[in-house]
Image (tube, rainbow, N blue to C red):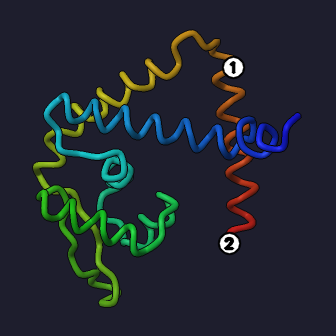
Amino acid sequence: MEIFEKVIDSSIAYLVGRTSRSIMKRLTNKFSTAGFDVSYEQWSILVHLYRRDGQTQQELANIAVKDKAAITRLLNVLEKKNMVLRIPDRTDKRSKLVYLTHKAKEFKTDLIDIVEDLLKEAEQGIEPDDIIQCRATLNKIFTNFDKLNR
């Protein structure tokens, strides 16, 4: 096996990265085609706020696995688009809580429908047991690195 095939072409990191970029590109395109000015990166924040509104920027950074600067940039854009609000935390004046705006809440169902459609596209021709195994394996890999990155 040639070194590039081993280290790059068939490595889990390369394959996951390539797949991730393809998913990001496809989802951003699907949002745009449906008339939503939302990128994959912005969705990665909105989805966590749909799950639990009113999180701190640090909580969002942790759950979205992004650094603080990236979260700040994403929130600045989402704020300009009137999708989120940052409100000072009453219990900790140093941090702000991030909330969805009415506008973002209005199109939650539409965005989720688009993501569900994307997931159907992604899983075409793949056996359900293979999907389950793939998720389990990827979660184990994530856990391995998450432990090392702490």
In space, the residues marked 1 and 2 are separated at their CA atoms by 30 Å
Residue 84, horizontal then vertical, whole percent: 20, 61
Which part of the image, by quadrant, shows the C terminus?
Answer: bottom right
Q: Is residue 47 above or below residue 117?
A: below
List the single residue furthest toward the bottom: 93
Residue 58, horizontal then vertical, whole percent: 43, 73
Residue drawn at (68%, 68%) of the image: 149
Q: Is residue 51 above or below residue 19?
A: below
Task: Tally the marks.
Answer: 2
Residue 142, horizontal then vertical, whole percent: 67, 51
Horizontal side, residue 46 vs residue 144: left or right: left
- Residue type at the position of mark 1: Asp
In the picture of the structure, the residue carrying the numbered disc 2 is 150
**Which of the labelled discs sits on residue 35, or is there none?**
none
Residue drawn at (19%, 29%) of the image: 33
List the single residue furthest toward the right: 1
Query: Dot 2: few (<14), some (14–19), or many (≥20) neighbours within 10 Å?
Result: few
Horizontal side, residue 92 vs residue 15: left or right: left
Horizontal side, residue 38 vs residue 21: left or right: left
Horizontal side, residue 141 vs residue 56: left or right: right
Secondary structure at numbered mark 2: loop
Q: Nearer the viewer, residue 101 or 67?
A: 67
Which part of the image, by quadrant, shows the N terminus?
Answer: top right
In the picture of the structure, the residue carrying the numbered disc 1 is 130
- Residue type at the position of mark 2: Arg
Residue drawn at (24%, 35%) of the image: 31
In which image quadrant can residue 2 be found?
top right
Residue 12, horizontal then vertical, whole percent: 72, 41
Residue drawn at (74%, 41%) of the image: 11
